Image: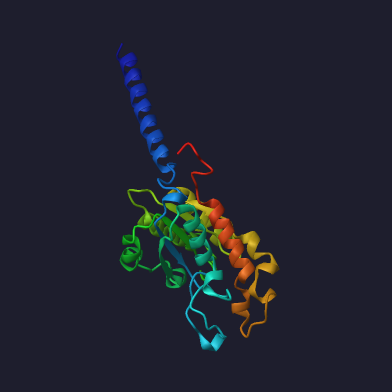
Amino acid sequence: MRRHRGFRLELLFATLVGCVAWGAGAMSDEGPGVRAEDVRKILFLGNSITLHGPKADIGWEGNWGMAATAPEKDYVHLVTAGIARRAGKPPETLVRNIADFERDYANYDVEAKMKELFAFDADLVVLSIGENVPALDSEEAGERFKAGVAKILAGVRSAKRPIVIVRSSFWADEAKDRRLREASDEAGAIYVDAGPLGREEANAARSERSYQHAGVGAHPGDRGMQALADAILRAVPSREADPAR
């Protein structure tokens, strides 16, 4: 009789654990609470592809995404314009180059240095990094990078459950992109693979005109920026595609 009662208690405990585990999974799989039409604030976090000030020694004179020919032709402005069309008004934007995080992710104090960015409380967050991350030549390095990305993704979350887009490296790198995808999946963000775009020579700025510095010419040109913007905008959930919401 005691064995029977013990079995029932074990079964009840297992059932309760299963319910808790299912609930946690359901929470982690929960999608964003807003749609493109709701977006009033966009936070762009990236590197030189997102924003780069003038640098005479490499022949770059702009103060926008390298190497678009004008501000309105970089992916940040194109995404903003696309969201404005869907939302019916221009969103407020905050654009920040976080290449310092890429280069020193293992020691970077995400919570302290990005506090202002998290406080912006964006409805849409676009994280576009990876290109400046040193080669991840060990599993430990890869896990440290992933942990740093996870801290950023945790920081941008809020009660309104913003739309969070994680874009892979334009210059594809299996080790970096795998960690970006894993961190994105675990945070319930939306992953956009930009690798195929970067492999198309027509998307490089050097295919459109000549550059003094090869590194600048390797950046996405106007066609590449448009392709990146299109890929990001396609990933942003919209009520037009989900009329039930």
Number of numbered discs present?
Answer: 0
Where residue 55 appears, as percent x and y from the top left, is: 50, 85
Where residue 116 appears, as percent x and y from the top left, is: 32, 66
Asked if 122 appears above or below 204 in the picture, the reply is above
Which one is nearer the viewer's eye here, 35 or 218?
A: 35
Q: Quadrant of residue 233?
A: bottom right
Residue 223 appearing in the image = yes
Asked if 160 appears above or below 19 in the picture, the reply is below
| Residue drawn 41% across the image and 47% down it | 34
Q: Residue furthest front?
A: 88
| Residue drawn 49% across the image and 44% down it | 239
Residue 173 appearing in the image = no
Look at the image and tell me in which quarter the N terminus lies. Answer: top left
Look at the image and tell me in which quarter the C terminus lies. Answer: top left
Asked if 140 appears above or below 134 in the picture, the reply is above
Asked if 26 appears above or below 150 in the picture, the reply is above
| Residue drawn 48% across the image and 36% down it | 244
Which one is nearer the viewer's eye here, 191 or 107?
A: 191
Where residue 97 appears, as percent x and y from the top left, is: 44, 71
Please indicate whether residue 16 sits to the left or right of residue 68 in the image. Answer: left
Where residue 225 appears, as percent x and y from the top left, is: 59, 67
